[in-house]
Image: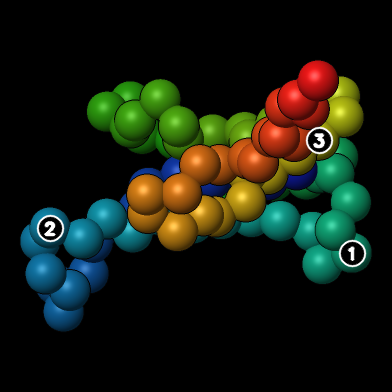
Amino acid sequence: MASAYTTPIPTPPALPAHLRVHVLVMRDDGRDLTPEDIAAAQATYPVPVTADADAGVIGKTKPTGKARAKATATKPGKPATKRAAAKRP
């Protein structure tokens, strides 16, 4: 189920015209929205026909697998990893 609902609303005259205002509807308890929650949000704040594709129901993101290890920061000019020195016979 969806974790949030968002839709643009008209920008108030007090804000600069280049700013976009969105309503974001989420539950206080952090759970997913129920179908009734989504219906109430859509009835109160319908998505305009001219809205961006990101308006409406936002799906819950789930991890797809193990987290990848983050690369460690290195100083410029230094190699990212050190190799063991080759042994000489």
Which of 66/30 is in front? 66
Question: Left or right of 20: which side holds 72?
Answer: right
Helix, strand or loop for disc 2: loop
Distance of mark 1 from mark 3, alpha carbons?
A: 26 Å
- Crowding at dot 2, Cα within 10 Å, few <14 / some 14-19 / many 20+, comes out as few
The C terminus lies in quadrant: top right
Spatial CA distance of label 1 from label 2 is 33 Å
Q: Give the amino acid type for the residue marked by disc 2 in the picture.
A: His
Residue matched to label 3: 67
Q: Find disc 1 in the rendering and name its residue.
A: 29
The residue at the far bottom in this view is: 14
Q: Secondary structure at mark 1?
A: loop
Q: What residue is rendered at 76% in x and 25% in y?
A: 88
Task: Name the residue that disc number 2 marks.
Answer: 18
| Front residue (pair 81, 14) | 81
Residue type (three-letter) at the residue carrying disc 1: Asp
Q: In the shown orientation, is residue 22 left or right of residue 72?
A: left
Dots 3 and 2: beta carbons under 8 Å? no
> Marks 3 and 2, how far apart in space?
37 Å
Q: Is residue 51 above or below residue 41?
A: above
